Image (cartoon, rainbow, N blue to C red):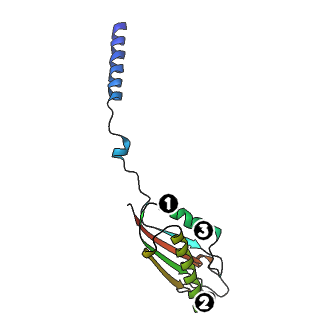
Amino acid sequence: MRFAKFVAAAALVAGLSACASGRGPARETIVATPSDCRSQTFEVYFADGEARLTETARQVIGMTATHLQGCDIQRVQVIGLADASGPASLNQNLSQRRATAVAEALAAAGWPTPVFEVAAAGGQGATVAPGVTEPLRRRTEVMVTAAPR
């Protein structure tokens, strides 16, 4: 009986050691690491009536630029928006200045400027009741088309 237990234990150890010695390919060769180089959209918000980047806006732009560093930036669409308060011409001008401010900050972060499309929507499409402001319209939408190099 004692001998049978010894034989069983020896067989188990031999079997387990055979499994451990059979190394397969390294994980890196069979599992692809997901790339951060993909198309994405982000928004940059502004204070009421302002086209100057806030510190938070600069951080968002900086983090996105860092996140896509080393990617092939193929296209960048920057669309400035404004709320419906004030005359349409002022809202159009404000949204253009917002879009330009964001595009310049992205270019300063090293993004290729020939791929930029900068547009302004002004207050077009923004509807509010009299006296109501829309802080969510005080922004610039940035759509980035990126791919791995």
Residue farthest top in this picture:
2
- To which residue does mark 2 refer? 90
Q: Specify the amino acid type for callout 1.
A: His
Q: Quadrant of the N terminus?
A: top left
Horizontal arrangement in the rendering, residue 133 relative to residue 103 (left or right): right
- To which residue does mark 3 refer? 58
Q: Specify the amino acid type for callout 3.
A: Arg
Of callouts 1 and 3, the N-terminal one: 3
Q: Position of residue 26 (x, y in %)?
A: 36, 40
The reply to whether the C-beta atoms of the residues labelled 2 and 3 are less than 8 Å apart is no
Determine the secondary structure under disc 3: helix
Q: Is residue 1 visible?
A: no
Q: Position of residue 28 (x, y in %)?
A: 37, 45
Residue 119, placed above or below residue 17? below
Q: Position of residue 33 (x, y in %)?
A: 40, 51
Residue farthest right in this picture:
131
* Residue at 33% over, 20% down: 14
Residue 111, placed above or below residue 96? above
- The image quadrant that residue 51 belongs to is bottom right
Determine the secondary structure under disc 1: helix
Residue 5, placed above or below residue 120? above
Q: Specify the amino acid type for callout 2.
A: Leu
Q: Which of the two residues, 67 or 5, is positioned nearer the viewer here?
A: 67
* Cα–Cα span, label 2 and label 1: 34 Å
- The image quadrant that residue 86 belongs to is bottom right
Tell me, for residue 145, which label it has, or none. none
Q: Quadrant of the C terminus?
A: bottom left
- To which residue does mark 1 refer? 67
